[in-house]
Image: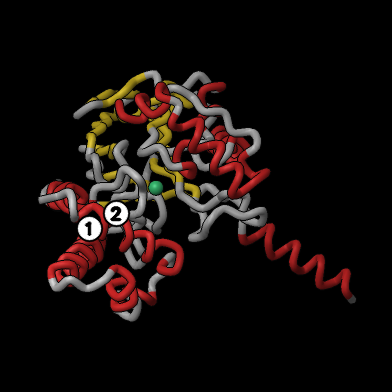
Amino acid sequence: MQIFFYILFFIFFQIAFSMELIKVKENIFMVKGISSLPSKENRGFISNAYAVKTKEGWVVIDSLSTPELAKEFISLLKKEYNKPIKYLVITHYHLDHYFGASEFKKEKAIILAHKNLNNLYEEGYLDTYLENIKKIFGDIFKNVRLVKPNITVKDRYSFSLGDKKFIVLSMTPAHTNTDIVVYLPEEKVLFAGDLVYKNRIPFVGDTFSNSKNWLKVLSQMKNMDINIILAGHNEPLDKSAIYFTYRYISFLREEILKMKDEDIEYDKIKEKLQNTEWSRYPMFKVFHNKNIYKIYNDLDFEF
Ligand SMILES: [Zn+2]
C-alpha cells in the first residue's frame, strides 16, 4: 500500500514539475515554471523562458535557473525545430533568468545582457551572489557556471535574425539594475522579464531595485504598441498587467511615505500593510515584507 502512495506521489511530482514546450503564437514558444522559491522537488524550475523561431535559428529569452534545466529546454527546442540557438537574451541577473546561461554558451549562442550585468560579473558581485544562493538552496545550483555576455546593452540594441527584427531596450534601474526587455515590432510582442506581473506580488526587494524609476518604466511601457506581454512568471498577459504592477508599487510607496511623514515606526508600518487587497496574491508571504523594507529605506534617499 505504502509503495502505491509513493508511486502516486512520484507521478504527481513528475507531472507537476516537468517541462513542456508551449506554443504561444506562430513562431513563439515558452516553457512555464511554477510560482515558488527553488526546491529539490521543483529543481529551480520557477520561471518562464521563451524562444522565437526564425529561418536562421532560435532567439531565446532567459536561460532558466540551472544548466540542467537549460539543457532540457534546448533539447525541446531542437526537437521542435532543429536549428541552432543563435542568441540568448538575459533580462536581468537573477538566478532564474541567468544561471542556465552556460548551456547556451556551449551551443555557441551570442549572449546579450545589460551593461550593468557585465559590470557585476567583472566586479565579482555575481560570484558572491552565486555562493550565497548555493548556501541557501544547496545542491540544485551546484553545476552553475557564470558566463560573461558577448554583447552588452546600455540604452538600445537591435538585431535581425532570419526575417525577424528584435529590439532590446534598457529599462533599468527597476526590478534590478540590469533590466532589459525585448520587443518584436511586427508581432507587437514584449518580453518583459520581471518588470510586469498580474495577480502575483512583484519583487521589489532586490539590493539594486528602484521603485520610483520602476513606475517610470511602466509608464513608458504603457505608451508602447503591445499586443502580448510575455513575462518571467505569468501566463501570457495583456497590457492590463502593466496597470496591476503599477498599482501595487505605487500603493506601497504612497502608504509608506504617508506613514513615515506621520512618524509611524517601521514595525507599525509593516503591520498596517499586512491585511490589504494584496495579501491574497501568490508570493505575498515571500516578497511583500521584503518590498516594504526596501521601499521604506529607499524613500529616505529620494528627495
Ligand atoms: Zn527577477
Residue at numbered disc 1: 242
Front residue (pair 88, 83): 88
* Residue displayed at 48% across by 60% down: 35
Q: Position of residue 100 (x, y in %)?
A: 53, 35
- Residue placed at 40% from the left, 37% from the top? 93
Q: In this picture, is 147 found above or below 135?
A: above
Residue bearing mark 2: 196
Query: Farthest residue toward the bottom?
Result: 275
Mark 1 Cβ and ligand 1 under 8 Å apart: no
- Choose between 263 and 153: the one closer to the eye: 263
Query: Which quadrant would the N terminus be assigned to in this image?
Result: bottom right
Other residues around mark 1 within 10 Å, as few (<14) / some (14–19) / many (≥20)? many
- Amino acid carrying label 1: it is Ile
Front position in the image: 22 or 252: 252
Q: Identify the residue at horizontal 68%, vertical 43% (top origin).
A: 139
Q: Gap between marks 2 and 1, in whole Å?
A: 6 Å
When the figure is inspected, residue 34 is found, relative to residue 95, above or below; the finding is below
Query: Do tag 2 and tag 1 residues touch (Cβ < 8 Å)?
Result: yes
